[in-house]
Amino acid sequence: MARKYQITAEVKKGWQAWGSISLITKSKMTENELIKTYGVIKNGFNKEKVDVLVRNFQCVRIDNAIFY
């Protein structure tokens, strides 16, 4: 069975308020990779960079889990 990782964090993008995220991925992710992922906004053919703050980041390996 493939390994999966659960990523949880609180994220603040630009002027927005803090929000919680919870992701299930097939690969590990660091706090910096999460910032890079959420730091770019696509608007048509343009890409804008946004300041992203992360707190309470956690990446945990989960095995033999069933998700519905």
Image: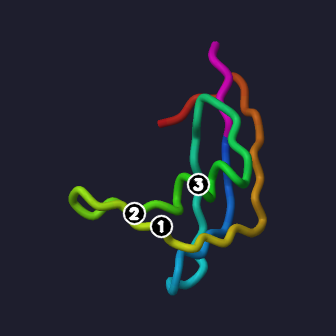
Q: How would you rate the neighbour count of disc 3 (Cα within 10 Å): few for under 14, some for 14-19, many for 20 or more?
A: few
Which of pointers 2 and 3 lies earlier in the amino acid sequence? Answer: 3
Which of pointers 1 and 2 lies earlier in the amino acid sequence? Answer: 2
> Disc 3 residue type?
Lys
Residue 66, given in percent of the width and then of the height, sits at 58, 29
Q: CA distance from mark 3 to mark 1?
A: 9 Å
Tell me if 45 is positioned left or right of 17 in this view: left
Vertical side of 25 occupied by 32: above or below: below
Residue 6, given in percent of the width and then of the height, sits at 67, 43
Disc 1 + disc 2, Cβ < 8 Å: yes
Q: How would you rate the neighbour count of disc 2 (Cα within 10 Å): few for under 14, some for 14-19, many for 20 or more?
A: few
User: How are the colours assigned in the image?
Assistant: rainbow
Q: Is residue 2 one of those drawn in magenta?
A: yes
Task: Considering the whole magenta stretch, tell me its main secondary structure.
Answer: loop
Q: Which mark is residue 49?
A: 1
Q: Residue at x 60, y 70 (%)?
A: 52
Which residue in the structure is indicated by mark 2? 41
Which residue in the structure is indicated by mark 3? 36
Q: Residue at x 59, y 75 (%)?
A: 12
